[in-house]
Amino acid sequence: MDYFLDEEQSMIRDLARQIADDKVMPVRAELDEKEEFPWEIMKTLAQSDFFGIYVPEEYGGLGKGGFELALVIEELSRACLGVSTTYAANALGTYPILLYGSDEQKRKYLPGIASGEKLVAFGLTEANAGSDASGVQTTAKLEGSEYVLNGTKQWITNGGEAEIYTIIAMTDKAKGARGASAFIVEKGTPGLSFGKKENKLGIKASSTRELIFENCRVPRENLIGKQGMGFIIAMKTLDNSRTGVGAQGVGVAQGAFDAAAAYARERHQFGQPIISIQAVQHMLADMATGIEAARALVYSVARFIDSKVKDVSKESAMAKLFATDVAMKVTVDAVQVMGGAGYMKEYPVEKMMRDAKILQIYEGTNQIQRNVIGQAIIKESARL
C-alpha cells in the first residue's frame, strides 16, 4: 500500500532500508552466533543522523517525530531484531529527558544523544517490578545536594554499553507509585556497576544486563521533572515508545514473509513450486494481510501521537499488541512454509521466530496491553 510519505520520509525509509540490506543482513547471523554488540552498525546509523530523528533541531536533532522513527525501526527489524532493539532502546531511554527534562538537561544531554555519540538505556524493570511498574524497590535518598541510589535493575537493554541511563527509583516508598522519581545517571558514576550479559533466546546482538546501584550518588539537578513524577514519566515514556515495538513487529514479520515467499517460489514438490499449492497460498495470504493491517495501525497511531494528543495509552497499546501478535504468528508460519529448511540456521526465519517472541514481552506484556485497552474502554463507556 501507499502510505503517502512525503519526500523526506521516503528518503529516511529508503536510507534505512539500504543500511539494513548492505550493513545488517550480511552480518546478522554472525552477530547472533557471537552475541556481538553491533557497534559498527550503530556508528553507521549515527553518521546517517538516525539517532537524532525525533530530537528537536534546537538540541541537534532533525526535529521529526515518532512516525519517522518507526520507519527506521521497521526497516532495521526486517533485517535483524537484535540490531533494531539496540537502536530503539536508545529512544526509549531518551524519551524521559525529551518529555520531562529541563531545558538545562536537554541542552546537556540531547546533542550527544542526537549525534549518536552517547547511547542511552531506560531502567525501570526489576525482579519484582515489570508488569507492575509500581513495585520498584530501588531507592533514591536525598542527602544534601545529591541523591543516593541503591538497588538493582534487571534485563536492561543496552545495559553496560550505554553512556546515559534514565532510572526510575523510589524517593518515598510510603506513597507507593506516587513516591517514584526519575533520574539521569551517567556511566562511570561511582556506585554504578553492571551484571553479566544475559544469555537470551533471541535478540542476541543486543546487550541485556543488570544495573547495580550501591550508594550511587547523582547530582540533585539530575532529577527529571519533579520528585514523585517517576511513575507518570515511565508511563508516558512507554506510551510514546510502544509504536516502536509495533514497528519492530511489522519489520520482522515482513522479513520472514519475504523469505518464506521467495523459498516457496523455488521449492518444488509434486512437480510444481509449493507457492502454487493452495494450502501454502492461503498461509501466505493470511501472513500478508496481517502485516498490512499491522503496518496501517502502527503508522496511524504513530502519526496520532505526533499530533500531540494528550492521552494515547489505548492506541499505543493497540499498536504494540496487534503488531507483535502478528509478528509471532507470521514468523512461526514462515518456518512452517519453509518446512525443514526453515528450521535450519542457514536460513534467517528460525532466528526471526526466536527474536519475535520478545516483542510480546518487553515494554509491557501483551496481556498488560489488553488491560490498558480494557481500562480505557471502561472509562470511555462511562462517558457515553
Image: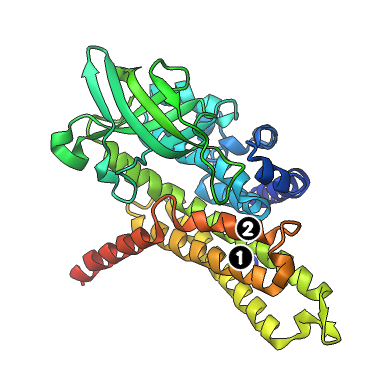
Using a 10 Å C-alpha cutoff, classify the residue at mark 1 as few (fewer than 14 neighbours), some (14 to 19) or many (20 or more): many
Front residue of 136 and 101:
136
- Residue wearing tag 2: 352
Does residue 255 appear in the picture of this structure? no
Above or below, 19 against 189 in this view is below
Q: Tell me where residue 29 appears, x and y as whole percent.
A: 71, 48
Inspect the image, locate mark 2, and give the three-letter code of the amino acid beneath it: Met
Badge 2 crowding class, 10 Å Cα cut-off, few under 14, some 14 to 19, many 20 or more, is many
Figure quadrant of the C terminus: bottom left
Residue 355 makes an appearance in the image = yes
* Residue 184 horizontal side relative to residue 331, left or right: left
Q: Which residue is mark 1?
A: 331
N-term mark: 1 or 2: 1
Q: Position of residue 240 (x, y in %)?
A: 42, 48
Whether residue 329 sits left or right of residue 211 in the image: it is: right
State which quadrant residue 51 falls in.
Answer: top right
Mark 1 to mark 2 CA distance (whole Å): 6 Å
Q: Residue at x 30, y 62 (%)?
A: 371
Residue 382 x/y as whole percent: 18, 69
Seen at 59% across and 25% down, the residue is 117
Query: Considering only vertical position in the picture, is 298 above or below 101?
Result: below
Instruction: Specify the quadrant of the image occupied by residue 137.
Output: top left
Q: Badges 1 and 2: C-beta atoms under 8 Å apart?
A: yes
Return the residue nearer the eye: 356 or 226.
Answer: 356
Q: Residue at x 42, y 50 (%)?
A: 363
User: Residue lying furthest right in this view?
Assistant: 271
**Circle 1: residue type:** Thr
Q: Is residue 296 above or below residue 164?
A: below
- Callout 1: SS: helix
